[in-house]
Structures are given as structure tokens and as C-alpha cells.
């Protein structure tokens, strides 16, 4: 989800590899081991959880997590939890990385020391305050000063134990000060509107006495205002601290007025007195990306150069190929290039062109496409995008079965346990390999068209280049479909979304043995037993040393390398796209609707329960396939309700004010609407995106909708009293119907610009290499030998155009940053005052002619 900023869209995303933890403190008991898991949090909101690693003080997770970040945040946090025998979770420690520090760790494996977790330090959100110092003349004629403190509102407070009933405590800090005042409690909201004013006497008149002596005028600069936010709890442990701010009164300045937003801070001395090294450490690899995307016309020059790449002769002189030459890793270039070419329908001609060039440079047919070239990385990325659902429907059922059955399949005599039988294990493994081999080799009709077209091109180029080798037309395709697609998915099903987590060690070993065998079966090598270094694998492979396996592989490869013959849209088998447990309530429509949502709404609720209470929301298991959207009482039970995809008229967010609940969205149908609450903001976005995509081509989709509910006789959004009023807000949409290829072309072009900008010095060096190659004969200089330059003149022309396009965009980014800096006001809602920005705020105020924000 993009944030709009003055005609520019800002996208945030994060990719995290959670490696392992070490030196976790032992459990205080006879069994010193712990059962630990790790969570990923945006501030205090959990968005991902690893599986539990049992009985370990150095748990290895090996899990990857990627998400688009749909909101602003201050910290990316990681918590290690321990689950005891009573299934109670207790926090061991945390890692909290500030947003502005994420670039320090970009793409690096880093060990972070775990920090103590304290309720007083777990804060998020911001508060809006207004302070005003005014003179008051008393009855005796003395001048007194009073401080009026107005607590206006808060935003983004944390939700504690499923609720947030906040109030603010306001106190004036200074010598002999102990005054404290409280706002009213605001129920069931983490964005409370307080709008309350409190008065404090600041300057005492000389006639005021205390402790038998006169108190002269106080030094206002030594006073400070303290505002603490609390959650009103019904628990016996008391109210929970949500965060606070300390505002020195010197910010009032000469005008005596201060109006600003503040980030809430932890309570002073709130941390536990625990030595950091006693809590252990966590290894993480964090890649945080922020894309600033301008309107489409700014990218036209660079985009046109990229999309013309397939037509450039030779292709090594094209803009896309040049990107692969200058990037440190080919994968860096392949990801945005593939997404851009897929978006514009030009992926097949581009990959065909670079593959043909690579084949012509290959001397040995046995090494064809074996390197990490731009061609191989682009085909890998295309298969991941276009083939993900093909992989799901082909492998997921059998992978799920392997992961749940836990059959012993170890065939290495050295690793065999005493209770295991080698022959039984071999038979278990043989059956699994046979079943997976059969589902793969009979799945050709479901292979996506774009993959078939690419494989056809590979086959033709290889067969033309190596006409004597009759098997090269097969090995050119099998090196991708088996070696880089099916085998890795079997080996690491969590990385291909076939399983939610990394398998346990025993299952992972089984999958490794299966993957090795499938990879060898697909390779069509002449001496297959010799491919195994381990003697036990060579012996096991004798089970499959029959011609029928080779014939099945060749028939499968023939089928998937026949261009344009099969269409993935004709798949009749339901493909599971997403499932999970969320809360829902149902509103039924009793009238017919045309535009918007029309008819009388009624909430389905349990008898005798409060109409708007949390209990109206039932926790249900949701399941989405390419055919229907269903919900069940629990996972595995029959569907309580089934909604055909063609009946989904709109999928939109539901504003929080409707039920005072976050992360809600609505699925609108002809007869009723489902109001659903996801577990967190990332999950809500994921459900909305996938539901929108699968229903995008429905003919009866609505054009407008109501973003809020109809309650108390009117729509909360537009205030219209007619329950049949047409929707007041245009439906979001215009997303492509193809589930796999939902790509933002401008965003991908922006990413490519960013890569060119990063590697500008290599672009300049490549220009020098073109000049050197054109002018001088003889051996190529060593510093230029890494570049593939087939035509120096054409390559130089392309490089010159690339540099010009990149510099134009660079100027646009510089102007945007300069303008944004000029408009930034510290203390505004967009830029609240934080622990490091207070001095900047004071300096900014002193440079202006007034002292109000």
C-alpha cells in the first residue's frame, strides 16, 4: 500500500531472514531447556511468528518473512518468547531497531543482543498537546500566571490484551510540585479524542506563603509538564502504562503558546536491571526498502529504453542487459526486470533474446544454463512469479502429507537410529519419491503459458546450437523446471509458500533425500548413480534405474516446451490461495441493490448479547481458492458458508469508527456483507489484496461503497439516513485480474533507476571499456574483462542514454528532498517531536518570528 505525498507515492517493504538465537538463559528448573519462538512486530503489532523450536537454548529458525508495510512505524521489533508446559508464553528479550537505523543493517547478517522487555518501555503512538501561559489578575490586584494545558488527542496507541481504554494523567513537575489531573477514560479506541483542558498555577503572588516563608516568582524554565497515557484495566494488577512525554515549559518562548504533536516515550528508569549479555542474542538479516515513485511520465525515457531491450542488436548492448552487467549480483537486476517485462507482456521476447545470446557463447552442451547468469536468474524469477500457483496445486498436497506423517526415511546407515529398520525406511522414501515424480510428470497440462513459451525458446536455441547432441533440447529445459523449480521447492517448502514454517530436522532430512533423487531423475544424466557422492544414495537410485522414468521425464518436457498449447486459466482443480483464522460478523441485505450497497442491514448476533460488543464477532477459519471463499468453525471442519468468487461485488476496508476495532474489512455480496477483522494490519492488507484480485473481473462489481457501517439510523461515513443510499466512496481497484502478475510498472522502473544510480561508477567504467575496446587492439585490459561487450559502439550509445535518463530522475529526487525538507515542520502531525528531535524543534522555533507551530 502506497502513501501519497504531494503527487508522489511512497512504498515501504521489509524482507527479513530470522536466523538463530544463541545463549538463551536456561529455564530455572530441572529441565533447563526452553521451547522458544520469535515474533516480528511493527511497533507493538505482531505481524509474523516463527514456529516453536523445542528443547533448545540456541534455537535455529531459518525462516524468511516479507511484507509490504501499510502504515507508518517507529520501530521494527523482534521478541523471543518461551512457552512453558502449561502453554503460557513469557518474553525473554527483544531487539528493537529504529526506522531511521534500518539502513545500517541493510542486507547484512547481524547479531543483535537481546534487550530486557519491560511494560514501561513497550510504547507507541503520539499525542497532541496545546500549552498556553496567560496572566490572571487576582482580586487583590496581584498578577498571577496560569498554565492552560489542553490534551487534544492521541493516535496509534498500543492495544493491551485485546483492548485499549486510554486516559491521560497530566502533572506539572518542579520544586514542591505534585499536582496531577486526569482526563476521562475513552473506551475501545486507540485513537482517543480527549479535548480536555487543565489549569495549573505557575507564578505565585508574593502574598502566597507555604511552610512559613514567602515564595517569590518561580523560574518557568525549570518547570516541565508531564503527560502519561494509561490503559484503564479491570485486572488486579492495575492500569497499564502506554507511554508519556515530558515538555519543558521553556518551549513556550516569548509568545507563551506551544501547540505540537509528540511521540510517546518509555517511562524513565522503566527497564529491568538485567545484564544484556545474560539474555542471549539473535541473528537477523534485514532489508528495508522505501520506494519514492513519481507520476508515470517521469519514467518514460528509462522505461522505453528498458522495454526496447529485446529488439537491440546485439542484446548485450541493451539497457536491461547492461543492468545485469553493472549490478554486484545478477539477482538484483533480475527481480525488477522480470516484474517490469511481465507487466508489459514482453518477458518472453526478452528472455528469448538473452538466452539465445548465452547459448551461442556456450561451448559445452553439458554446461548449458549452469551458471548464475542474467538469463538463469530471470527465468528463476519468472517461474517464482508465474508458476507459484502451479507449484501449489502440484506439490502442496503431498508435501503436507510428508510433513504431517513423520515417517522415518533415513537411508544413511551411519545416521540410522537403533529402533529404525533400513529396508522399511528405503521403502518409505521410495514411495514418497514415486508419488512426487508422478504428480510432477503428469502436471504438464497445468504449466503456465508464459513458462511454456520460455521453455520452447530455450529448447529451440539449444537444439539449433548443438545439433549433434539429441538430449540438449531436454536438458536445457530440465535444468530449470527440475533443478531450479521443483527440487528447491521440495527442499525448502516454506520458501515457496508450500508450508508456513521451516520443517523439523527429521522431515527436512526426508525432503532433502527426495529433492536429490527428483533432481537426478529430471537431469537425464548418462550415468546417474555416479551423480551421487554417497554410496547409500547411489544404491537407493537403483530402484529408479528403469527406462520408464526417463520416458516420463521426456514426455513431460516435450509437453511443457510446446509453445502456446496450454492455458493455465483452464485449470479446473481448485487452488488454495490463502487461509487463516480471523473474526467476523455478518450483515444481511434484504433489498435489491444497484450501485453501492442497498437494502436494510441487520447484524447477526447471539441472543441476549450487546449489539456492538466484541462478542458479536465469531472467530472463524477462512479459506480462499480460485473457485470460492469459505469459512469454517475450525480448520478441517465443513464450511459454514461458501461464497462463489463470482458473487464477490467488492472488497474494501471498514473504517475503525464503525465498531471501534482495527484491521477490519468488508466482503460485499448481492445478499449480504461480511465484516471481518484480521489479526494485524499486514494480514488485513493481504486478505484485501488477494480477494480483490480473484474477483476483479466479476461483471457485477460495485463502483461505489460505504467505508463505514450503517448504525443508529445513518451511515457513519456520509451521514445519510437512508439505509438504501448508494455508496459514497468510489471502490478501489483497477488491479490486473492475473493473480500472479500484479505489478506496479512505475515502481519497478524506480527500483531499476535506484540500481543504476547506485552503480553509476561501474556505468562510467563500462563506457571507458567501450572506448578502450574500440580504439585499441590486442588483449583486453583486466579491469574491463568482467563486462560482456559484443559491440562497443552500440553499447556506448546505450550507456550514454542510460546515464542521461538516470541523471534526469536524480535531479527530480533531489528537488523532492529539498522541497520536503523546506516544508518539514517538527511538531506537526506528520513529524512529531521525539527524543532526538526536541533540540531541532527549539532551534527551528528560535529561527522563526513566532513561537507557535
Image (cartoon, helix red, strand yellow):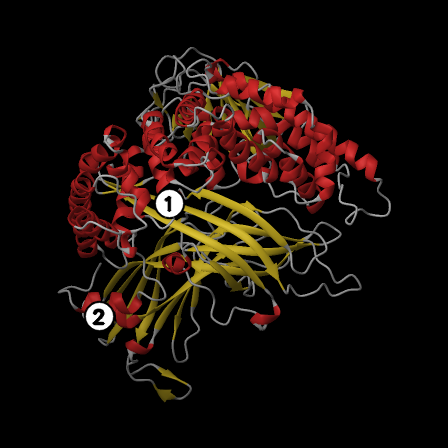
Indicate which disc residue 253 carries. Answer: 2
The answer to whether 824 is drawn above or below residue 582 in the figure is below
Q: Determine the residue located farthest toward the right in the rendered image.
A: 419
Mark 1, residues whose alpha carbon is within 10 Å: few (<14), some, or many (≥20)?
Answer: some
Q: How many marks?
A: 2
Would residue 87 appear left or right of 680 to someone viewing this image?
right
| Residue at the outermost left position | 849
Mark 1, residue position? 332
Task: Say if residue 75 shows up in the picture.
Answer: yes
Q: Quadrant of the N terminus?
A: top left
Q: Residue at x 49, y 32 (%)?
A: 480
Q: Residue farthest to the top?
A: 592
Question: Considering only order in the chain, which callout, 1 or 2, is on the residue closer to the N terminus?
Answer: 2
Q: Is residue 22 above or below residue 581?
A: below
Quadrant (top left/top right/bottom left/bottom right) for the C terminus: bottom left
Categorize mark 2 by other alpha carbons within 10 Å: few (<14), some (14-19), many (20+).
Answer: some
The kind of secondary structure element at disc 2 is loop
Q: Secondary structure at mark 1?
A: helix
Residue 827: percent from the left, percent from the top?
28, 59
Q: Position of residue 291 (x, y in %)?
A: 31, 45
| In this picture, residue 435 sits left or right of residue 48 | right
Specify whether 571 is left or right of 57. Answer: left
Answer above or below: position of 584 versus 695: below
The correct choice, above or below, for 533 with respect to 340 in the image is below
Amino acid at each position: 500500500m502506497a502513501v501519497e505525498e504531494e503527487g508522489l507515492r511512497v512504498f515501504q517493504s521489509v524482507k527479513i531472514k530470522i536466523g538463530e538465537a544463541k545463549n538463551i538463559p536456561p529455564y530455572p528448573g530441572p529441565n533447563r531447556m526452553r521451547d522458544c519462538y520469535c515474533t516480528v512486530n511493527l511497533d507493538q503489532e505482531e505481524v509474523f511468528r516463527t514456529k516453536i523450536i523445542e528443547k533448545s537454548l540456541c534455537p535455529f529458525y531459518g525462516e524468511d518473512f516479507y511484507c509490504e508495510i501499510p502504515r507508518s512505524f517507529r520501530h521494527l521489533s523482534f521478541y523471543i518468547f518461551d512457552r512453558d508446559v502449561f502453554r503460557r508464553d513469557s518474553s525473554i528479550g527483544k531487539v528493537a531497531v529504529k526506522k531511521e537505523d534500518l539502513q545500517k543493517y541493510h542486507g547484512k547478517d547481524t547479531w543483535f543482543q537481546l534487550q530486557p522487555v519491560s511494560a514501561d518501555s513497550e510504547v507507541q503512538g503520539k499525542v497532541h498537546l496545546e500549552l498556553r501561559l496567560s496572566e490572571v489578575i487576582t482580586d487583590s490586584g496581584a498578577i498571577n500566571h496560569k498554565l492552560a494545558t489542553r490534551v487534544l488527542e492521541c493516535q496509534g496507541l498500543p492495544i493491551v490484551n485485546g483492548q485499549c481504554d486510554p486516559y491521560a494523567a497530566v502533572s506539572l513537575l518542579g520544586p514542591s510540585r505534585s499536582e496531577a489531573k486526569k482526563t476521562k477514560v475513552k473506551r475501545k479506541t486507540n485513537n482517543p479524542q480527549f479535548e480536555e483542558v487543565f489549569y495549573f498555577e505557575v507564578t505565585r503572588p508574593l502574598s502566597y506563603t507555604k511552610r512559613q516563608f514567602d515564595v517569590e516568582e518561580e523560574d518557568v524554565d525549570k518547570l516541565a509538564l508531564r503527560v502519561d497515557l494509561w490503559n484503564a484495566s479491570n485486572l488486579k494488577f492495575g492500569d497499564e502504562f502506554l507511554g508519556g512525554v515530558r515538555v519543558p515549559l521553556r518551549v513556550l518562548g516569548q509568545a507563551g503558546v506551544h501547540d505540537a504533536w509528540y511521540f510517546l516515550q518509555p517511562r524513565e528508569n522503566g527497564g529491568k536491571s538485567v545484564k544484556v549479555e545474560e539474555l542471549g542474542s539473535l541473528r537477523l538479516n534485514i532489508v528495508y526498502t522505501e520506494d519514492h515513485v513519481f507520476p508515470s511520465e517521469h519514467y518514460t525515457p528509462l522505461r522505453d529504453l528498458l522495454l526496447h531491450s529485446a529488439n537491440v542488436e546485439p542484446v548485450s548492448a541493451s539497457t536491461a542487459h547492461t543492468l545485469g552487467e553493472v549490478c554486484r549480483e545478477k539477482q538484483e537486476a533480475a527481480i525488477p526486470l522480470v516484474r517490469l517485462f511481465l507487466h508489459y507482456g514482453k518477458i518472453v521476447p526478452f528472455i528469448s533474446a538473452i538466452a539465445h545470446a548465452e547459448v551461442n557463447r556456450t561451448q559445452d552442451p553439458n554446461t548449458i544454463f549452469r551458471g548464475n547468469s542474467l538469463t538463469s536468474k530471470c527465468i528463476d524469477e519468472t517461474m517464482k512469479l508465474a508458476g507459484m500457483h502451479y507449484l501449489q496445486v502440484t506439490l502442496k498436497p503431498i508435501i503436507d502429507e510428508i510433513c504431517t506423517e513423520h515417517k522415518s526415511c533415513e537411508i544413511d546407515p551411519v545416521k540410522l537410529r537403533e529402533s529404525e529398520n533400513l529396508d522399511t525406511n528405503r521403502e518409505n522414501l521410495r514411495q514418497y519419491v514415486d508419488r512426487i515424480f508422478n504428480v510432477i510428470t503428469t502436471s504438464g497440462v497445468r504449466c503456465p503459458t508464459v513458462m511454456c513459451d520460455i521453455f520452447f525458446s530455450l529448447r529451440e536455441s539449444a537444439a539449433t546450437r548443438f545439433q549433434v547432441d539429441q538430449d540438449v533440447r531436454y536438458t536445457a529445459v530440465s535444468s530449470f523446471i527440475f533443478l531450479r523449480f521443483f527440487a528447491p521447492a521440495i527442499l525448502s517448502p516454506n520458501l515457496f509458500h508450500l508450508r508456513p514454517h521451516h520443517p523439523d530436522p527429521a522431515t527436512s532430512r526426508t525432503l532433502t533425500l527426495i529433492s536429490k533423487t527428483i533432481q537426478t531423475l529430471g537431469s537425464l544424466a548418462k550415468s546417474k548413480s555416479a551423480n551421487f557422492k554417497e554410496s547409500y544414495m547411489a544404491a537407493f537410485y537403483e530402484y529408479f534405474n528403469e527406462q520408464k522414468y526417463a520416458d516420463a521425464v521426456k514426455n513431460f518436457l516435450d509437453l511443457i516446451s510446446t509453445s502456446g498449447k496450454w492455458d493455465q486459466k483452464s485449470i479446473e482443480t481448485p487452488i488454495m490461495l490463502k487461509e487463516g483464522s480471523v473474526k467476523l460478523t455478518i450483515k444481511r441485505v434484504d433489498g435489491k441493490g444497484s450501485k453501492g450497497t442497498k437494502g436494510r442491514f441487520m447484524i447477526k448476533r447471539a441472543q441476549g448479547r450487546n449489539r456492538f460488543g466484541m462478542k458479536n464477532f465469531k472467530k472463524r477459519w477462512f479459506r480462499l481458492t480460485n473457485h470460492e471463499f469459505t469459512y469454517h468453525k475450525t480448520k478441517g471442519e465443513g464450511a459454514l458458508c461458501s461464497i462463489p468468487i463470482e458473487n464477490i461485488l467488492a472488497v474494501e476496508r471498514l473504517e475503525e469508527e464503525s465498531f471501534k476495532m482495527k484491521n477490519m474489512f468488508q466482503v460485499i455480496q448481492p445478499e449480504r456483507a461480511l465484516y471481518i477483522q484480521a489479526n494485524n494490519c499486514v494480514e488485513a492488507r493481504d486478505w484485501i489484496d488477494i480477494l480483490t484480485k480473484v474477483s476483479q473481473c466479476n461483471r457485477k462489481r460495485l463502483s461505489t461503497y460505504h467505508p463505514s457501517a450503517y448504525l443508529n439510523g445513518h451511515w457513519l461515513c456520509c451521514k445519510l439516513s437512508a439505509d438504501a443510499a448508494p455508496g459514497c466512496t468510489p471502490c478501489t481497484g483497477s488491479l490486473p485480474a492475473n493473480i500472479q502478475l500484479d505489478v506496479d510498472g512505475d515502481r519497478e522502473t524506480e527500483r531499476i533507476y535506484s540500481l543504476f544510480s547506485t552503480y553509476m561508477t561501474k556505468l562510467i567504467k563500462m563506457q571507458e571499456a567501450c572506448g578502450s575496446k574500440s580504439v585499441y587492439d590486442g588483449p583486453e585490459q583486466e579491469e574491463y574483462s568482467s563486462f560482456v561487450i559484443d559491440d562497443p559502439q552500440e553499447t556506448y550509445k546505450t550507456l550514454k542514454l542510460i546515464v542521461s535518463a538516470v541523471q534526469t530522475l536524480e535531479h527530480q529526487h533531489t528537488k523532492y528532498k529539498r522541497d520536503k525538507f523546506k516544508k518539514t515542520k517538527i511538531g506537526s502531525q506528520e513529524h512529531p517531536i521525539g527524543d532526538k528531535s526536541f533540540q531541532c524543534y527549539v532551534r527551528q522555533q528560535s529561527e522563526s518570528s513566532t513561537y507557535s507551530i
